[in-house]
Image (cartoon, grey):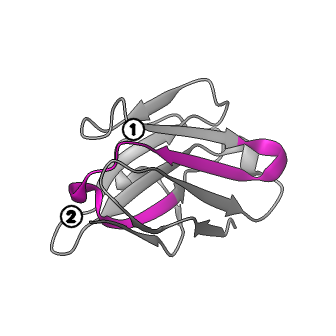
Amino acid sequence: QVQLVESGGGLVQPGGSLRLSCTASGRTFSRHPMAWFRQAPGKEREFVAAISWSGGSTYYGDSVKGRFTISRDNAKNTVYLQMNSLKPEDTAVYYCAAGDQYCSGNYYATKSYRYWGQGTQVTVSS
């Protein structure tokens, strides 16, 4: 069982930056692919970014490419999402997710992830 806790959300002006963190419980973090999804009111949950269990590959949704960066620190059991050049349309609840150990399936699909955090609110507004 993996428990995930997100932090770092908040209110930021357009063009600003935020860094989200997601810390996992347990000793198997380094074996799990990790991802960030987001969900705005009235919309479906949307893929944002993912990183393979090895950290060697990263994947991004089209709407965040070039602005967001996902990374992981296995020594700290933590995955990060650095968000730059934020736009009002980035406003959403951001969720951290973990896939099964050593899994390398469809990184873009919610069904590929077994464990989910509670989410952290990001609001981009002037």
Q: How crowded is mark 2: few (under 14 residues within 10 Å), some or many (20 or more)?
A: few
Looking at the rendering, the stretch of residues picked out in magenta corresponds to 73-96
Q: Is residue 7 above or below residue 49?
A: below
The residue to which callout 1 is attached is: 106
The residue to which callout 2 is attached is: 44
Residue 31, given in percent of the width and then of the height, sits at: 71, 42
Image position of 34 (left or right of 27):
left
Q: Is residue 21 in the magenta section? A: no
| Nearest to viewer (mark 2 / mark 1) | 2
The residue under the point 81% across, 51% down is 76
| Mark with earlier residue (2, 1) | 2
**Amino acid type shown at disc 1:** Asn
Residue 6, given in percent of the width and then of the height, sits at: 58, 67
- Residue furthest out toward the left: 42
Image position of 49 (left or right of 20):
left
Q: Is residue 34 above or below residue 9?
A: above
Image position of 66 (left or right of 76):
left
Task: Say what secondary structure mark 1 lies in.
Answer: loop
**Amino acid type shown at disc 2:** Glu
The residue under the point 54% across, 37% down is 51
Give the quadrant of the C terminus: bottom left
> Looking at the rendering, which quadrant does residue 75 occupy?
top right
Q: In this view, does 10 lie above or below 114?
A: below
Mark identifier at residue 26: none
Q: How crowded is mark 1: few (under 14 residues within 10 Å), some or many (20 or more)?
A: few
